[in-house]
Image: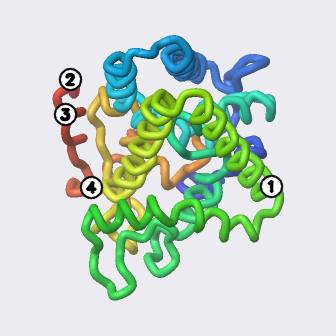
Amino acid sequence: MPPFERKTAPPTQAPTRQSASGSTVFRFTEDRLPVAVFAALFAMDLIVFALVSAWPIVLAWAALSVPAKVCIASWNHHHQHVPFFHSATCNRLMEVVFGLQTGAVSNVWVLHHNLGHHDHYMDQSKDESAWRAPDGRVMSSNEYTWKLALTGYLCAFQKSAEHPAIRRTFVAMTLLHVALLAALVWINPFNAVAIYIIPMLISFVMTCRHTYDHHAGCSEEDEYAASNNITHRWYNILTGNLGYHTAHHLRPGLHWSKLPAFHARIADKIPPENFRGPGLPMSLLPAM
C-alpha cells in the first residue's frame, strides 16, 4: 500500500492487514490496560447496581462515571475499527460492556462510521455524518449533534442492507442490549436508569458532538485539511490518540497506538488551522 493511501477500515468481524504485536488473547498488547480499566468500571457499575440502595450514593457514582464513559466511547470506536481480541466471542463480550457503557452496540459504528463516514467524509452530499445541511450551510453544533444522535441507529440499519453478515450481528446485539436493559429496569428501575441508561445516553450524544468538532467547516477537497487535530497529551491518553484525526482518516485501519508515529510523518502537510485545543474540561489537564 502506498505511504498515505486511504483505506476503509474493516468491520469487527474481519482482521486488519497490519501485523499485530499481541498475545494469544489480545491482538495488540497495548489494549490490555484499557480493557482492564473498562472491565473494572463495568464491575463497579454492577456492584453499585446490585448492592447500593441509598439513592445519593447511586447518583454520586453515576455522576462520577459519566466522564469516564464519554472517554470510553472513543475506545469503543477504536475497537470497531481494530478489534481488541483474536476471538470473535471475546469481541462480542467486549461489545456488551461497551454497549452498556456508551450506548453504541456491536457494528453500529462499523456501519455508520467505518463503512459510511470514512468513505464519504469528503463528500457532504453522501457523508453519513454530514456537517453541512442539504441547503449548503454549516450546521450549528447543537443541530448536528441531535440530528446524528437521533438518526444514528436508523442510518446504520439502512446501511446494513448492503452488508447482511454485519447486519445480523448488529440486529442481534441491539436486541440483546434492549433485553439486558429491560431486565435491569425490571430488577431495580432507579438504579438502572441512573447507572446505565442516563450515562449511556450522555456518552452517545457526546460522541456525536465530538464528530462535529473533528470535521465541521473543514476542507472538502484536501484530505490533510479535512479533519481537526488535537495533540494535547492527556486528551490523547484518555481517548486513545483520537486527536490525531487526520492520521486516523488516512489510515482508519491503523491501531490507535500507532497513530502518533504516523501523525509525525504527515504533520507538516496539515494546515495550522487544523490544529486546536481540546476544550474544557480536558484543557485543564497537562498538555505536556
Question: Which residue is depicted at the point 50% across and 71% down?
Answer: 127
Front-most of residues 47 and 26: 47
Circle 4: is it few (<14), some (14-19), or many (20+) Cα within 10 Å?
Answer: some
Q: Comparing marks 1 and 2, which lies closer to the viewer?
A: 1
CA gap between label 1 and label 3 equals 41 Å
Q: Comparing marks 4 and 2, which lies closer to the viewer?
A: 2
Q: Residue furthest bottom?
A: 135
Which quarter of the picture shows residue 238? top left
Q: Earlier in the sequence, mark 3 or mark 4?
A: 4
Say if mark 3 contacts mark 4, CB within 8 Å: no
**Residue 74: in sight, yes or no?**
no
Front-most of residues 136 and 250: 136
* Residue 157 tag number: none
Question: Which residue is depicted at the point 52% across and 11% down?
Answer: 51
Amino acid type, residue under disc 3 in the picture: Ser
Where residue 83 appears, x then y in whole percent? 67, 36
Q: Give the residue pinned by disc 3.
A: 283
Where residue 32 appears, x then y in whole percent? 60, 17
Quarter of the image with the C terminus is top left
Q: Is residue 213 left or right of residue 118?
A: left
CA gap between label 4 and label 2 equals 21 Å
Q: Is residue 214 left or right of residue 14?
A: left
Amino acid type, residue under disc 2 in the picture: Pro
Q: Give the residue pinned by disc 4.
A: 274
Q: Earlier in the sequence, mark 1 or mark 2?
A: 1
Q: Give the residue pinned by disc 1.
A: 168
Q: Give the residue pinned by disc 2.
A: 286
Front-most of residues 87 and 140: 140
Where residue 262 appears, x then y in whole percent? 47, 40
**Residue 75: in sight, yes or no?**
yes
Amino acid type, residue under disc 4 in the picture: Asn
